[in-house]
Structure formats: structure tokens, C-alpha cells
Image: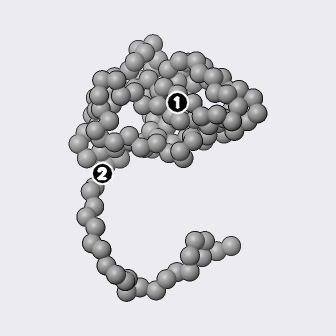
Amino acid sequence: MKIIIKRFDTSLPMPEYKTSGAAAFDLYVREETTIPAKKVVLVPLNIALQLPENHWALLSARSSLHKQGLMLANGIGVGDYDYRGDGDEYKAALWNFTDEPVVLQKGDRVVQMIVMSRESVEFEEVKKFNTDDRGGFGSTGK
């Protein structure tokens, strides 16, 4: 699959898969960014994409992000197919859960992206299901 990409700062590398079996590619912080303690900051990730039709992008934290005292404020990020304008730079909403400011340097890798296919669903509403309840959240184990 080919994806049209724009880098806002061409001195930073193109996104790439770091191993042949990697599911996601890392994105780079475009500019030094300070995230104050207990605050959320939108961190620019240096790319805009024009995804193929019926595809979307999932942004997730790199597994080491928590070691910096940061996490994605919204758990994951979703880049819709129609987020594709010239200025539509992907950003990560990062929450600093520490008591000190965290400084990200230009070029730091903080999130990763997976491009996935999308299938629209059609809903059929019913009054009652014809299957048994499982027992609620966490019902399969302790």
C-alpha cells in the first residue's frame, strides 16, 4: 500500500518500520516540547497523510512512553480517512502524570501508528437478544 505523506520538517526521518515484523511505525516529535506536570499538551508529530480510501490510522503510545512519565491522554488516537488537508499534522495529546515538567526533544519517538482498513457497518436494532448474558464486565476470571 502506498500512502501520500507530507513532512513539516524534512530534517526529521521518514516514518519507517524498525523491524521486518513490526506492526507499527514510530512518529517523531517535530519540535522541543515541554509538558508541565499534571497537564496535557498536543505534541506535533511532523506528518500529514492522505490515506487510501477505506483506511484509517491508529496512534498508540510506544511501550517505553510511561518511563518518561507520559501517556496518551485519550488512550489512543484515531486518524480518519478525511483528515488529509495540507495542514492536518498528526499530533499526540500527551499527559504528564509526574510532579515535574517533561521535556521532549525534537526527533524523540513517542507514539506509533498502524494503518488499518475500514469497513462501514449497518445497524439493525432489536428489542431483545436471543442469547444468554455472560454476567458482566470481568466475568470470565478474577
The residue at the point 53 percent across, 35 percent down is 93
- Which mark's residue is nearer the viewer, 1 or 2? 1
- Decide: is 62 above or below 46: below
Q: Secondary structure at mark 1?
A: strand
Would residue 93 be found to the left or right of residue 8 on screen? right
Q: Which quadrant holds the C terminus?
A: bottom right
Q: How is the image coloured?
A: one colour
Q: Secondary structure at mark 2?
A: loop
Would residue 63 be found to the left or right of residue 81 on screen? right
Q: Which mark is residue 68?
A: none
Residue 73, horizontal then vertical, whole percent: 57, 41
Labels 1 and 2: the sequence-earlier one: 1
Residue 21, horizontal then vertical, whole percent: 46, 43
Evaluate if marks 1 and 2 touch, with contact meaning CB atoms under 8 Å apart. Answer: no
The residue at the point 38 percent across, 83 percent down is 129
Crowding at dot 1, Cα within 10 Å, few <14 / some 14-19 / many 20+, comes out as some
Residue 9, horizontal then vertical, whole percent: 43, 15
Residue assigned mark 1: 42
Residue 45, horizontal then vertical, whole percent: 47, 27
- Decide: is 67 above or below 135: above
Q: Using the image as rendered, state which of residue 87 and residue 14 is in the foreground.
A: 87
Q: Using the image as rendered, state which of residue 64 and residue 127 is in the foreground.
A: 127
Crowding at dot 2, Cα within 10 Å, few <14 / some 14-19 / many 20+, comes out as few
Q: Quadrant of residue 124?
A: bottom left
- Decide: is 46 above or below 115: above
Would residue 66 be found to the left or right of residue 54 on screen? right
The residue at the point 34 percent across, 42 percent down is 80
What amino acid type is highlighted by mark number 1?
Leu
User: In the rendered image, is residue 18 in sight?
Assistant: no
Q: Which mark is residue 118?
A: 2
